[in-house]
């Protein structure tokens, strides 16, 4: 793209120089043509080459052919008897056509970068257990049925079923949900998720090309090629319009001189008129403006972090009456906050105090919310024997008391008689020395501008809004 931009700038400067020379220096017409050919070829050589390839392959009916024949006609008009040269016009038409192509490449480049970022969810290598050893191999070479080893912090490379271990998976890249999902033996793991805590071994169930992450990337790449109805119309229009215009121009150059009875005397005049017709019939505004408008829209949206998969989706957006929104990270911050504390015997502060101590070293987002709710947890309390149980919670000895903080599965493991909560959110249960002590409600926080965004959508004509969420 930088090369094309440099060509456009250089051609524009040389065009300005050529115009100055034409107005201040008396030169023969052929010398002026040579001067204008420099910026014309600099900016348009690739269009001419594409048109030539189309002719060689029998495909004359595209925008490159239309632009080439129109601009070459403009360059040639001035050599006819009694005609005025139109060299600047030829360069201007090619210059603006290439400017439209530049904006198109810019928008496509942003889409490709977005796709490249998306491809980070798919690891290129996989740790596989073979012959009693764990070896790292390219993901494409892993077969269905192989056992892959996923270490804490690694991204799941392929879809599979857990055969050994338990852990929590961060599925935000696939679902947008920031609450890690607990997995154990016989649970399914999908490529693109991140293993948060425990070591996992899983039997591969899908090949690299059929994995969830690969299919997501393929869908985005293919959908980026979808054109709008307007762009499709322009393509069809050019295929019909171009041969009609060229045919009429040929007939205009030949039939009137033949009918006049003096072919040689009138041919030059009618050839000039045919070329003029050819130049003015070139639908530059349509060919340039419609794709440019859609690509500018896609580029503008991408700067705001919105990936529109193709121009046809912009067409559909203009007619949208219902909008469906993800919740986590879209309407909400994707950051958890403590919303309620329900102790059984202790006061709320003491329950939070114990939970924050136990979760002191955990990387789980819920643990971070508990520490945020009790910022004074770095006190003189003794915290020992911290044990994180993947997919269940954390236990520790705090000032001599065995404290367990986690989900209902952990409570049942230690024999604590927990009870459910009516509040919406993630329920974090706490037990002290095996006795249930209460629970803490943690939930996502609504973004401060969510209401404003929904009001703006309604003002834009959205009649109904729907929220999708995996929460309670």
Image: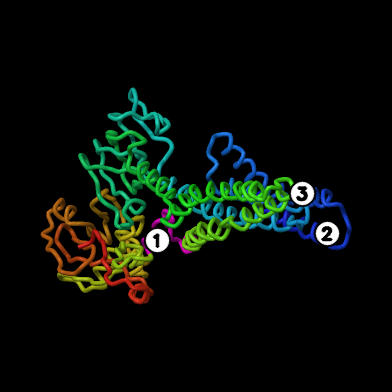
Disc 2 crowd rating (10 Å Cα; few below 14, some 14-19, many 20+) is some
Residue toward you, 458 or 269: 269
Residue visible at 55% across and 49% down in the picture: 63
Disc 1 crowd rating (10 Å Cα; few below 14, some 14-19, many 20+) is some
Q: Is residue 371 visible?
A: no
Residue at the top extreme, as displayed:
131
Residue 395 at x, y percent in the picture: 25, 54
Find disc 2 in the rendering and name its residue.
22
Find out whether the residues at labels 1 and 3 contact each other: C-beta distance under 8 Å. no
Quick check: 314 above or below 217?
Answer: below
Quick check: 205 above or below 376?
Answer: above
Residue 145 at x, y percent in the picture: 27, 29
- Helix, strand or loop under label 1: helix
Find disc 3 in the rendering and name its residue.
38
Residue 366 lies in quadrant: bottom left
Q: Give the range drawn in magenta.
A: 302-317
Q: Which mark is residue 435?
A: none
**Magenta stretch holds residue 371:** no
Q: Distance between the residues labelled 1 and 3?
A: 40 Å
Find disc 1 in the rendering and name its residue.
315
Q: Can residue 29 be seen in this view?
A: yes
Q: The C terminus appears in which quarter of the rendering?
A: bottom left
- Helix, strand or loop under label 3: helix
Left of 195 or right of it: where is 16? right
Left of 162 or right of it: where is 80? right
For the residues carrying marks 2 and 1, which lies nearer the camera in this image?
A: 2
Residue 303 at x, y percent in the picture: 50, 62
Residue 384 at x, y percent in the picture: 31, 55
Residue toward you, 97 or 379: 97
Q: Which of marks 3 and 2 is nearer the N terminus?
A: 2
Find out whether the residues at labels 3 and 2 contact each other: C-beta distance under 8 Å. no
Q: Which of marks 2 and 1 is nearer the N terminus?
A: 2
């Amino acid at each position: 793209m930088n090369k094309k931009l440099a060509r456009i700038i250089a051609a524009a400067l040389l065009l300005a120089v050529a115009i100055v020379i034409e107005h201040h220096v008396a030169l023969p017409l052929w010398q002026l043509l040579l001067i204008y050919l420099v910026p014309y070829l600099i900016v348009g050589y690739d269009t001419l080459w594409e048109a030539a390839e189309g002719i060689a392959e029998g495909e004359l009916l595209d925008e490159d052919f239309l632009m080439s024949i129109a601009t070459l006609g403009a360059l040639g008009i001035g050599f006819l008897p009694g005609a005025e040269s139109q060299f600047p016009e030829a360069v201007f038409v090619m210059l603006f056509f290439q400017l439209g192509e530049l904006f198109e490449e810019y928008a496509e480049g942003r889409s490709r970068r977005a796709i490249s970022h998306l491809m980070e969810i798919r690891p290129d290598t996989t740790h596989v257990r073979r012959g009693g050893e764990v070896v790292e191999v390219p993901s494409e070479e892993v077969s269905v049925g192989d056992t892959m080893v996923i270490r804490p912090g690694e991204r799941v490379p392929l879809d599979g079923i857990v055969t050994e271990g338990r852990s929590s998976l961060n599925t935000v890249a696939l679902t947008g949900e920031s609450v890690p999902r607990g997995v154990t033996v016989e649970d399914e793991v999908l490529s693109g998720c991140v293993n948060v805590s425990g070591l996992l071994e899983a039997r591969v169930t899908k090949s690299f090309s059929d994995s969830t992450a690969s299919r997501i990337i393929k869908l985005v790449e293919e959908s980026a090629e979808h054109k709008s109805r307007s762009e499709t119309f322009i393509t069809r229009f050019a295929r019909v319009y171009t041969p009609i215009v060229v045919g009429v121009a040929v007939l205009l150059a030949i039939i009137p001189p033949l009918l006049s009875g003096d072919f040689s005397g009138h041919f030059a005049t009618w050839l000039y008129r045919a070329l003029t017709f050819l130049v003015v019939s070139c639908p530059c505004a349509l060919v340039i403006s419609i794709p440019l408008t859609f690509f500018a829209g896609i580029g503008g949206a991408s700067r705001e972090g919105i990936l529109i998969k193709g121009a046809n989706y912009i067409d559909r957006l203009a007619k949208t009456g219902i909008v469906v929104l993800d919740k986590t990270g879209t309407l909400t911050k994707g950051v958890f906050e403590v919303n309620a504390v329900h102790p059984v015997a202790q006061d709320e502060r003491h329950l939070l105090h114990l939970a924050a101590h136990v979760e002191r070293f955990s990387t789980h987002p819920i643990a971070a919310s508990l520490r945020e709710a009790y910022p004074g947890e770095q006190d003189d309390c003794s915290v020992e024997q911290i044990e994180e149980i993947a997919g269940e919670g954390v236990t520790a000895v705090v000032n001599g008391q065995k404290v367990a903080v986690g989900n209902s599965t952990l409570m049942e493991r230690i024999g604590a008689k927990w009870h459910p909560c009516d509040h919406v959110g993630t329920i974090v249960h706490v037990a002290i020395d095996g006795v249930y002590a209460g629970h803490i409600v943690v939930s996502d926080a609504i973004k401060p501008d969510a209401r404003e965004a929904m009001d703006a959508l309604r003002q834009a004509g959205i009649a109904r809004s729907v929220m999708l969420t995996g929460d309670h």
